[in-house]
Image: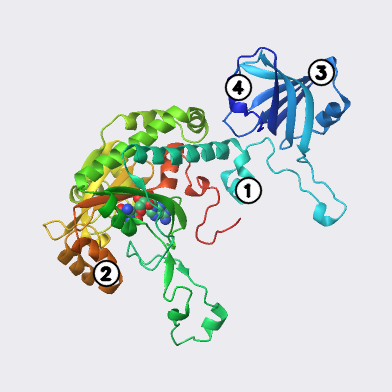
Amino acid sequence: MLPKLIKYILKETPQSQEVEISGWVRTKRDMKNLIFVEINDGSCFSGIQCTFDRSIGMDRETEAALSALTTGASVKIKGLLVSSPAGGQAVEVAACELRIFGEAPAENKHGKTPELDIQAYPLQKKRHSLEFLREIAHLRPRTNTFGAVARLRSRLAFAIHKFFQERDFHYLHTPVITAGDCEGAGAMFQVTTLDHAAVKQFAGGSVDYSKDFFGKKTYLTVSGQLEAETYAMALSRVYTFGPTFRAENSNTARHLAEFWMVEPEVAFAELKDNMALAEDFLKYIFKTALEECSQELEFFDAHIENGIIKSLLHIANTKFAHITYTDAVMELEKAAAADRGLFEFQPRWGNDLHSEHERFLTEKIAGGPVIVTDYPKGIKAFYMKQNDDNKTVRAMDVLVPRLGEIIGGSQREDNLEKLIWRLKDMGMRTEDYQWYLDLRRYGSVPHSGFGLGFERLIQYISGMANIRDVIPYPRAVGQAEF
Ligand code: 4AD
Ligand code: MG
């Protein structure tokens, strides 16, 4: 039988019943006859306090284990669950037996051979910088911060499935390896089994990709959208939730080379339906976080980003603002004219919004999330539905304070002719998109969808400043450790 988790033991009514705790030592305090040991098993934010009383006497093995016990060691403790005289906890364990599974030395330890040398356990009680913890990403889940992030991620991944399943969306698995560039941004990782040393010999000539594993050039997907559209044209409502890859050379606090994206795609839905879906979806996730990860959020509020609970509560209950790209640029220009030093990049119709502009729109103009729609077609992907003005497309980006873009989506171009012209216009090969164009040849319908960056969502809810701290093993330019 699996051991009972601390999460459940903490909720029991203390009646001096026997309990057994398995976990890792967070702290040990020695005060005369009493030794307080806090154990955490990661099942919830809190640990449980186990108190050993020397004056009662204990078995030899326990006594030896207690003196050897250090932060980070893994243990099993037996004792009685009693109500706690200390503040901040309802129950504690009057412990009688301690066994150590694995030590975690507090000082460097010499082994029989150099390979058996062990450095002192790096997670001592003091507070560590997030940069330092990134270097020991395999140990950082044992800290309060990263334990909380991991539980939040897990719980919200489940909530995402729940939201869509409850609304009759079918979960679709789109391929990780693809031959096409969904976003047309060219920021793709190539997948090949060709021998690079051999390829080098062709230098100057061209590589024959028909000899490659798939018989053509292939990449890691940047988005499952195009494939999701094919299934939405059959099942009406689908969503994907999987890893996506971008070889963008952007070393920022909100970009990863590998991130998880949630992409719903809905048939018979126009842009306004898509906007409403995105808003309902985000609010559902915020509410879930507030209700089901309250301990984690309290920690983030106190130690990571002050006021985060209040702002999530506010946002979960307030209508999102809507603004067109054209109006947004007008507002930004007005603000930039009034204060020349306000922006590093001057806002200009036709250019993409920079993150400083996105933040200004949310923080100063809307005072909360804002959905910006109808972007110039020149800065958006080929598949977006063209507006009658011939200049803009039915795009929508959901922007949030602190972070900027959290969701990007659109109504899709469902007119065959317009889509073909757009592809040609952008210098893309229509031959590569025949299957995609078939959707417009046979039973085409208005349809829409969006993509949510899962790490940006976790960043937003936790207040963590760097996206590399909300995914277990971040992949970014020059970084693929572990
Ligand atoms: O705006 P994007 O590029 O949209 C798409 O990929 C569409 N195919 C989605 C769709 O309509 N089905 O990406 C969507 C979201 C962004 O809003 C952002 O939250 C996240 O994905 N994202 C990233 N997150 C982390 N690192 C990166 N490099 C990201 N690029 C995009
Ligand atoms: Mg985008």
* Cβ–Cβ under 8 Å for marks 3 and 2: no
Q: CA distance from mark 1 to mark 3?
A: 36 Å
The residue mark sitting in front, 1 or 4, is 4
Q: In this figure, which residue is indicated by the disc labeled 2?
A: 434
Mark 3 and mark 4: Cα distance apart in space: 25 Å
Q: Earlier in the sequence, mark 3 or mark 4?
A: 4
User: Which SS class for mark 4?
Assistant: loop
Q: Residue at x 82, y 34 (%)?
A: 68
Among the two numbered marks 1 and 4 on one chain, the one whose residue lies closer to the N terminus:
4
Does residue 87 lie above or below 217 as drawn? above
Work out whether mark 1 precedes mark 3 in sequence or the reverse, and give the earlier one: 3
Q: Which residue is mark 4?
A: 10
Give the quarter of the image for residue 20: top right
Q: How many marks?
A: 4
Q: Mark 2 or 1 closer to N-term?
A: 1
Q: From the top left corner, tell me how far across and down residue 248 is, in percent.
A: 42, 62
Q: Rounded to the nearest whole Å, what is the CA distance between mark 1 and mark 4?
A: 27 Å
In this rendering, the label closer to the viewer, 3 or 2: 2
Residue underneath mark 1:
138
Instruction: Tell me the kind of residue under disc 2.
Output: Gln
